């Protein structure tokens, strides 16, 4: 994980986007494990609600493309985090928190095959876009 500090403007930006006034109580902001990019993720706890804040530096991250793929998947009926706010220039995203459950440990060869079958059956347009882009399917997965 990165040792860079949380950008000073990130939390005030998120609170403003949510319409929340910070009256001396500092909301709970914790680091969430990220990925192999320069993006960093934080969980914001506000009372009973959780949000994910992403810092995705625009110099290294393709934030507009990320949001376009998010919109495409959402339009195809795939559950993706809701987007509450975005500041593309600073690389800040305020997203729905879908929790800590990770997909990979839940998958087996059988469940993966069932998922592919369901994707083919439920959303031919999504399945076609996955095959056409060859970016979402795991390497070496043969589909006939």
Image (tube, rainbow, N blue to C red):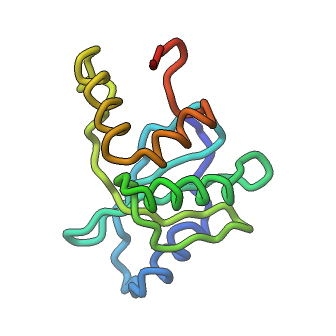
Residue 79, compared with residue 116, is above or below; it is below
Identity of the residue drawn at 54% across and 17% down:
139
Q: What percent of the width, then of the height, locates residue 121? A: 32, 40
Q: Quadrant of residue 143?
A: top left
How many marks the image carries: the answer is: 0
Which residue is nearer to you in this view: 125 or 1?
125
- Placement of 116 over or under 56, stated as above or below: above
Using the image, determine if residue 139 lies above or below residue 34: above
Spot occupied by residue 62 in the image (x, y as percentages of width and height) = 71, 51
Q: Depth check: 17 or 143 in front?
A: 143
Towards the viewer: 8 or 103: 103
Residue 84 at x, y = what percent? 45, 73
59 to the left or right of 72: right
At 28% across and 14% down in the image, what residue appears?
109
Q: Determine the image quadrant of residue 114.
A: top left
Residue at point 25%, 68% (across, down): 49
């Amino acid at each position: 994980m990165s040792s860079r500090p949380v950008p000073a403007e990130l939390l005030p930006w998120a609170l403003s986007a949510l319409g929340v006034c910070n009256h001396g109580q500092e909301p709970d902001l914790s680091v969430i494990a990220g990925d192999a990019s320069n993006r960093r993720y934080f969980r914001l706890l506000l009372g009973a609600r959780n949000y994910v804040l992403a810092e995705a530096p625009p110099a290294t991250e393709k934030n507009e493309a990320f949001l376009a793929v998010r919109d495409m998947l959402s339009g195809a009926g795939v559950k993706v985090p809701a987007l509450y706010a975005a500041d593309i220039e600073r690389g800040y995203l305020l997203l729905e928190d879908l929790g800590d459950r990770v997909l990979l440990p839940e998958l087996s060869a059988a469940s993966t095959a069932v998922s592919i079958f369901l994707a083919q059956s439920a959303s031919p347009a999504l399945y076609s876009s996955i095959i056409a882009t060859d970016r979402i399917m795991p390497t070496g997965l043969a589909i006939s």
